[in-house]
Amino acid sequence: MTAEPVLDLIDADDAPGDPRGADRGSIQSISRAADVLALLDQDTRVLTPAIVAARLGLNRTTAHRYLQSMQSSGFLSATYGPGPLLDQLSALVSERQQILALAPGIMRQLSDLTNLTSVLSFPGRSGAVVTLVEEASRGTIVLTVRVGTVLELKAAQSRVLVAFQSDPTLGSRIHAGMTPSELRAEQAELAKVRRDRIAWADLDRVGLASVAAPVFGGRDVQAAMALLGTSAMLSPTDPTAERVRQLQDAAEKLSALLVTER
């Protein structure tokens, strides 16, 4: 019996010929797949058609089809236990939790050393997403950014995450709206980022500047750490300035801790 993709499993209560049935069936299939996964716990390490049918009120044939489809999609293993896709997602969540636990102290120290706001961002679908912010504790004017902000494509943190991303679809997806000339210019900029391990923002905001460095976990980039300041305090014409070196040291320290904690 050939396994079918989860999204193609249409529940029996959708009326044949109803053009909305496929959409409703797909949505119900996603919900049912989540219900199946929720059956896995410390007492139920593997599933069977009998278990799924009994606990979810399905007939055994439908339960078996769900299990087969979810196994072929990577949600379940060959024995209908947790599959490789769940392992991948749990590793990602675990690594991000590690970063969120380790980063605040390092960022606080960086902000105190530089008297600038430090920011940590994770990769998002359309650019870097601000996740942690440690504002400068001194000064009459504090530059900051809100947690949850999706940064622009030419933001320093977005550039870092794209430049070192092992998934080529991320760059192609977020750069899809650029003209050929804009794309060539951005690719040249990303090459510099990979060479120097430092990215500068290009946001046409007079008087403001930001610089970012990659945070690695294993061989792949996990986050971007940045400093926000005025162009007088941060300047791409002086990339070896003390504040930039302090940022790089902080990002490397966090990367080293992630490797140690594994």
Image (cartoon, grey):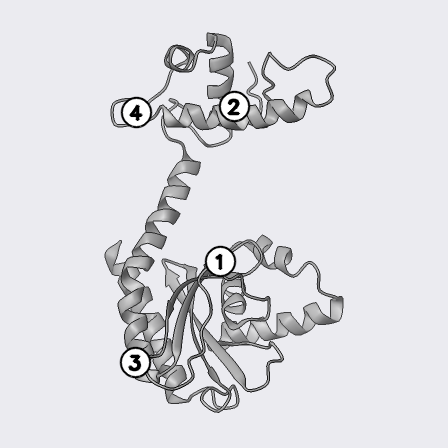
SS for callout 3: helix
What residue is at 38 percent from the left and 14 percent from the top? 55
Q: CA distance from mark 1 to mark 3?
A: 26 Å
Q: Which mark is residue 123?
A: 1
Which amino acid, by three-letter code, is at mark 4?
Answer: Arg
**Which residue carries the number 4 mark?**
45
Q: Residue at x 40, y 27 (%)?
A: 37
Q: Which residue is mark 2?
A: 69
User: Does residue 165 lie above or below 90 as drawn?
Assistant: below
Q: Which label sits in the foreground, 4 or 1?
A: 1
Q: Residue 195, image x and y in percent?
A: 50, 75
The quadrant of the image that shows the N terminus is top right
Q: Which residue is mark 3?
A: 112
Find the distance from the CA under tag 4 to the CA under tag 2: 18 Å
Distance from disc 4 to disc 1, alpha carbons, whole Å, reads 32 Å
User: Which element is circle 2 on?
Assistant: helix
Crowd class of label 4 (few under 14; some 14 to 19; many from 20; radius 10 Å): few
